[in-house]
Image (tube, grey):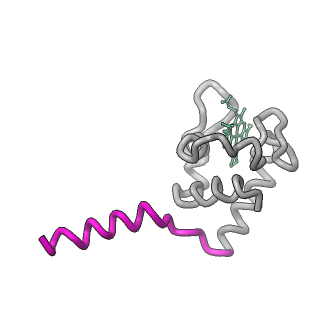
Amino acid sequence: MKKLLLPVLLCMSSVGFAAEPSAERQAEIRTLLQNSCAGCHGASLQGAMGPSLQPEALASKADDLLITTILNGRKGTAMSSWKASLEPDEVTWLVKTLKSGK
Ligand code: HEC
């Protein structure tokens, strides 16, 4: 019984607390957002060719949907996969950051 507990706890913690990117990496991701995402989503992410990524626009959308969209892109649309540039934990952080508007 005891042997089972540790792996179970480890699993739970990795789901509950996705690692935040380092401060340096956060700055890089913000640069990517300005240099790459803003081209389609608008200079202030207010929406352009792609939909708005501002907090009001994202509030009603599930985190999972937004995370999957950034990681995998959406087939048949201009939204491509960013898996090559962003780790899943980084995308989780990015979605949280976009939703908070910070
Ligand atoms: C070439 C243009 C383009 C670029 C670059 C781009 N997107 Fe998109 N994005 C789109 C389009 C178009 C959609 C809407 C797809 C659809 O019709 O469902 C979209 C959808 C999304 C959505 C889902 C929004 C919603 O309301 O469901 C998110 C989140 C998103 N993009 C984030 C990003 C991020 C983060 C980046 C940069 C890493 C990025 N996009 C780069 C065009 C782009």
Residue 88 lies within the magenta run: no
Percent coordinates x, y for residue 47 in the rendering? 82, 39
Percent coordinates x, y for residue 58 in the rendering? 70, 44
Left or right: 26, with 41 as reference point: left
Specify the principal SS of the magenta part.
helix
Q: Residue furthest left?
A: 1
What quarter of the picture does the N terminus occupy? bottom left
Left or right: 89, with 16 as reference point: right
Question: Residue shown at 18%/68% (left/top)?
Answer: 4
Question: Residue shown at 57%/47% (left/top)?
Answer: 63
Q: Nearer the viewer, residue 4 or 67?
A: 4
Q: Nearer the viewer, residue 5 or 31?
A: 5
Question: Residue shown at 70%/31% (left/top)?
Answer: 78
Q: Is residue 74 above or below residue 2?
A: above
Q: Is residue 57 above or below residue 78?
A: below
Magenta stretch in the rendered image: 1-23
**Ligand 1 lies in quarter:** top right
Q: Is residue 66 above or below residue 25?
A: above
